[in-house]
């Protein structure tokens, strides 16, 4: 009888030790390692920005790149709600977009896209805008003077946008030009 009690105590002690070991070493971080996803970009530069957005454009994650070279970071994207997302690397003249879908704890990356950013130059009373549009998506240009819209134009069906807007007859003051295209916005503040 004493032997049976001793064996039972040893078994209980071993189970207790095993459970404590499992609790200590199988934390939620370690369990999620199997669900982590690596996001990679080549030829990044210090100061560029990585942003993860949901399907309505809300930023879920934002980080400025600290070193130039190849970027690689592991994320637990499965913690996100089911839906469509993008990982976007904002470079000098383009944005590299890696769309992905989160569905029931599974992450699927889709084909990478490049979105060219508009180039806005101000020369005295002229606004010069150029933009390469690879997929002919509509582009909207809006110019504000002191927070009031003074000009708005929607451009469609052009691969390359080249526009010059003259403000020679416009009043002096603060201006903002905003360009919306492909779910992204670019803006420039200036004064004439």
Image (cartoon, rainbow, N blue to C red):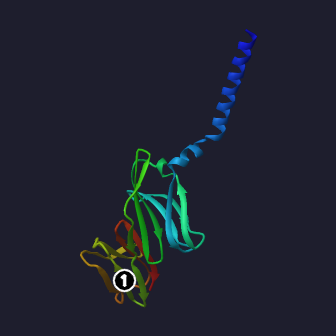
Q: Quadrant of the N terminus?
A: top right
Of all residues, the one furthest to the left in this rendering is 157
| Relative depth, front residue between 79 and 106 | 106
- Location of residue 72 in the rendering, given as x and y in whole percent from the top left corner: 54, 63
> Which residue is rendered at x = 63% and y = 36% of the image?
22
> Which residue is rendered at x = 60% and y = 69% of the image?
66
- Location of residue 133 in the rendering, given as x and y in whole percent from the top left corner: 32, 76
| Relative depth, front residue between 126 and 62 | 62
> Which residue is rendered at x = 50% and y = 48% of the image?
35
| Left or right: 144, with 24 as reference point | left
Q: In the rendered view, would you say 25 is above or below 154?
A: above
| Relative depth, front residue between 152 and 70 | 70
Q: Which residue is mark 1?
A: 129
- Location of residue 3 in the rendering, given as x and y in whole percent from the top left corner: 74, 13
Helix, strand or loop for disc 1: strand
Picture quadrant of residue 56 = bottom left
- Location of residue 31 in the rendering, given as x and y in whole percent from the top left corner: 56, 43
> Which residue is rendered at x = 57% and y = 74% of the image?
68
């Amino acid at each position: 009888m004493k032997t049976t009690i001793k064996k039972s105590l040893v078994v209980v002690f071993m189970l207790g030790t095993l459970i404590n070991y499992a609790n200590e070493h199988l934390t939620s971080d370690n369990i999620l390692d199997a669900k982590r996803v690596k996001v990679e970009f080549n030829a990044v530069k210090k100061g560029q920005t990585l942003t993860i957005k949901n399907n309505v454009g809300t930023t879920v994650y934002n980080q400025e790149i600290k070193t130039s070279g190849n970027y690689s970071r592991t994320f637990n994207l499965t913690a996100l709600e089911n839906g469509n997302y993008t990982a976007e690397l904002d470079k000098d003249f383009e944005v590299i977009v890696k769309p992905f879908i989160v569905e029931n704890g599974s992450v699927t990356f889709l084909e990478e896209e490049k979105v060219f950013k508009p180039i806005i130059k101000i020369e005295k009373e002229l606004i010069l805008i150029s933009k390469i549009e690879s997929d002919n998506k509509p582009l909207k240009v809006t110019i504000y003077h002191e927070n009031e819209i003074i000009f708005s134009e929607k451009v469609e069906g052009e691969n390359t946008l080249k526009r010059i807007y003259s403000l020679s007859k416009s009043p002096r003051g603060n201006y903002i030009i905003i360009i919306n295209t492909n779910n992204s916005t670019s803006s420039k503040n200036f004064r004439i």
